[in-house]
Amino acid sequence: QLQLVESGGGLVQPGGSLRLSCAASGFTLDYFAIGWFRQAPGKEREGVSCISNSRGITNYADSVKGRFTVSRDSAKNTVYLQMNSLKSEDTAVYYCGKGRSCATIPPLPSFFDSWGQGTQVTVSS
């Protein structure tokens, strides 16, 4: 059965780094776009980044550009989100989703049809 599992979240100080993982099972990740999204308390889910199913083309929300990097390890069937220079406003539950393409910049939740359960990222001193 298709499954996405996020991991790697935690508590980090401002300026610190975390690497989130999105591990796929039940399907081959390489054939799909994988989007990263986040949702803070009381806010709507917003797109953070996307990596395409074609040559690993990526995009990022302006708010994270230059700080976050999305990548794919095909051998592990896993997509990563490296988050550097973290800010308090990055605090949210982070989700990965499966879609057909990274058609918008940043990705739109409605274009993704399967989700993991999320991993909490808290940036606080």
Image: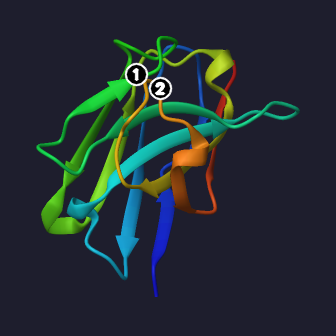
Q: Earlier in the sequence, mark 2 or mark 1?
A: 1
Nearer-the-camera pick, 15 or 83: 83
Q: Quadrant of the C terminus?
A: top right
Task: Identify the residue under disc 2.
Answer: 106
User: Is 44 left or right of 78, judged from the image as shown?
Assistant: right
**Cβ–Cβ below 8 Å for labels 2 and 1?**
no
User: Where 41 sits versus 53, above or below?
Assistant: above
Nearer-the-camera pick, 85 or 39: 39
User: Is 106 left or right of 119, judged from the image as shown?
Assistant: left
User: Where 82 sits versus 114, above or below?
Assistant: above
Image coords of residue 61 (percent x, y): 47, 20
State the mark number for residue 84.
Answer: 1
> Which SS class for mark 1?
loop
Quarter where residue 23 is shown: bottom left
> Which SS class for mark 2?
loop
Q: Nearer the viewer, mark 2 or mark 1?
A: 2
Image coords of residue 87 (percent x, y): 59, 15
User: Is 58 left or right of 22, judged from the image as shown?
Assistant: left
Looking at the rendered structure, the number of numbered marks drawn on it comes to 2
The outermost residue toward the right is: 42
Residue at horizontal 28 percent and vertical 64 percent from the top: 29
* Three-letter code, disc 1: Asn
Quarter where residue 98 is shown: bottom left
Residue at horizontal 46 percent and vertical 88 percent from the top: 1
